[in-house]
Image (cartoon, rainbow, N blue to C red):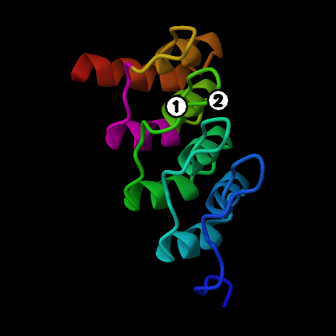
Amino acid sequence: MLLSAEVDKDMVPNHGATALHLAADLGHVDVVHLLLSAGVDKDKVTNDGATALHMAAFNGNLQVVPLLLEAGVDTDTGTSKDGSTAFHCAAEHGYLEIVRLLKESGAGKDEVTSNGETALHLAVKNGHLEVVHLLLHVEIGS
């Protein structure tokens, strides 16, 4: 079996992405599940500062995000070169359900990028009305 004791399941090539990063990035739900079951480092960051959650959120992989959240990933670990968290990525790209999941999991709504932008700023800048509404509703209701 691939995940036997002989294989380093957290090994990284030069760019720093683990097998979990790649599976999350590409939306391979069953592979993500298997890797998490094998005990991979779920919060490891790439050389660019991204986690597997970051990659799943950036690409809108709605089936992968809940698996990572259920495994207990840190929602605010890892920031890309511009300081974006997974929450920023989901809001910027308009992935409403991922934003909702991350918010419900405690992702920091007030975290800012290196440009001082919150998830709300990024959603507004990109015209994602439903995400803006969700973020405003959450902020007003808090």
Q: Position of residue 15 (x, y in %)?
A: 76, 46
Do residues under tags 2 and 1 come within 8 Å of each other at their CB atoms? no
Q: Is residue 38 placed above or below 108 in the rendered structure?
A: below
13 in magenta: no
Q: Nearer the viewer, mark 2 or mark 1?
A: 1
Q: Is residue 104 placed above or below 22 in the rendered structure?
A: above
In-front residue for pair 115/66 = 115
Q: What mark, if any, has residue 85 been given in the picture? A: 1
Residue interval drawn in magenta: 97-110
Q: Quadrant of the N terminus?
A: bottom right
In-front residue for pair 137/56 = 56
In-front residue for pair 126/115 = 115
Disc 1, SS: loop
In-front residue for pair 115/28 = 115
Q: Residue at x 50, y 26 (%)?
A: 131
Q: Position of residue 109 (x, y in %)?
A: 38, 24
Distance of label 2 from label 1 (alpha carbons): 13 Å
Looking at the rendered structure, the kind of residue marked 2 is His
The answer to which quarter of the image holds residue 57 is top right
Q: Position of residue 29 (x, y in %)?
A: 62, 66
Q: What mark, if any, has residue 13 been given in the picture? A: none
Q: Residue at x 42, y 36 (%)?
A: 76
Disc 2, SS: helix
23 lies left or right of 78: right
Looking at the rendered structure, the kind of residue marked 1 is Thr
Q: Residue at x 40, y 62 (%)?
A: 71
